[in-house]
Amino acid sequence: MTHLLNTYGRLPISFTHGQGSWLWDKDGNKYLDALAGIAVCSVGHAHPRLVKAISDQASKLLHCSNYFEIPLQEAVASKLVEYSGLSAAFFCNSGLEANECAFKLARKYGHDKGIEVPNIIVMKHAFHGRSIATLSATGNPLVRSGFAPYTEGFIHVEEQNTEVIREIAKNNPNVVAVMFEPVQGEGGVIPIDLHVIQELRQICDENDWLLMVDEVQSGMGRTGKWFAHQWAEVKPDVMTLAKGLAGGVPVGAVVCSEKAKQIFKPGNHGTTFGGNPLAMRSALEVINIIEDEKLVENAEVVGKRLKKALSKSLNGFAGVRGIRGKGLMLGIVLDRDAHDILDSGLKAGLTFSVTAGNVIRLVPPLNLSEAEADEIVSRITPVIRAFLAQPKI
């Protein structure tokens, strides 16, 4: 009997420890980790510098309150501002909270302009979280089902259709922002075309809207840039972060442009645990490790190698529709539901996930080596071959 709510379809494995890109279960079996806690363990497991930083901070101060100055927040914010080219940051506990904050920013921005019911344009295959507001902005009907009524004010459009957005701009004076993921993770590892991102920036500028990017999964070096939208050479007004920011310690962040940082005033938003000293020390050390070990560059180089090797290894597999993504955020698209492949992956000593039903998602640690990338290919190829050889259901 379990005393846990029935919220996860868990796999029958329990891990006891990890090291780098490897995990061990309670029976001593070893696994190459191509999931990294869903793009969270950005510097791998048990990185000695992160372990030392967390231990040191735990011996000093875990939590105080945002009633007081927390110098580590300023240190992390300074790094995020430096690498994004934006102006200011707010810290919370998760990607969901970061996206909630972004929606509040957009609504406050609209109200300050005299708009009674501010509207935010979002994408049909987006995933922004599971609270009522972030669920309302999420497109997946399977995730949304059973939780109506939804929060008003979200307009869902097809990802690449900027003409529809331009038409909305002509006819809806209540729109205040556009929000999207540069690479849709839960939507199936779908990169938004760079020219679309550039045009979205242009549309927002033309209409005095906020351009908001959800980098919760794609940020912090995962795609070979510090932030995935930087491939399009644009700057957003609002950027949300979480997952890989602190290497496994819960943290979220909202980073704002000069324009957007003026919206909130004291009392408009807050958090009890967000930005606490432990989370900030962890985030700062993760950023320092990414810098010192050149992990953004590693994600690009090793990611290209992994993608190329997968393409070659899986070439000719009738059930493989393609491989997409950037850096170490890759998706192998199959022609059928792939959830049953997860057990086979574990038997092969490999962890990964399946998203959007038919996409095998690979988001390993950013310090994955070339040899480990090759090992992923050698382990996953026979797993996919055997899976596709089964009768299609």
Image: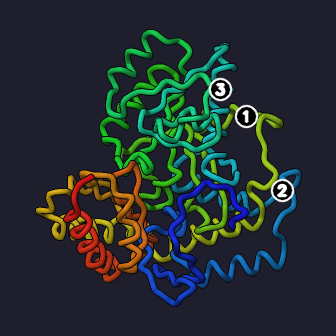
Residue 239 lies left or right of residue 4; in this view the side is left
Task: Classify 67 as above or below 268.
Answer: below
Extreme-front residue of the structure: 1
Circle 2 packing at 10 Å, graded few (<14), some (14-19), many (20+), is few
Residue drawn at 38 percent across, 67 percent down: 299
Residue denoted by label 1: 264
Residue denoted by label 3: 107
Residue denoted by label 2: 69
Q: Is residue 87 visible?
A: no
Residue drawn at 54 percent across, 64 percent down: 10
Tag 1 near tag 3, CB within 8 Å: no
Q: Which of the marked residues, 1 or 3, is nearer the chain's N terminus?
A: 3
Extreme-bottom residue of the structure: 28
Q: List x then y, in percent, for residue 86.
A: 56, 45
Q: Which of the marked residues, 1 or 2, is nearer the chain's N terminus?
A: 2
Closer to viewer: mark 1 or mark 3: 3
The N terminus: image quadrant: bottom right
Count the marks. 3
Q: Which of the marked residues, 2 or 3, is nearer the chain's N terminus?
A: 2
Residue 316 lies left or right of residue 61; in this view the side is left
Q: Residue type at mark 2: give it.
A: Glu
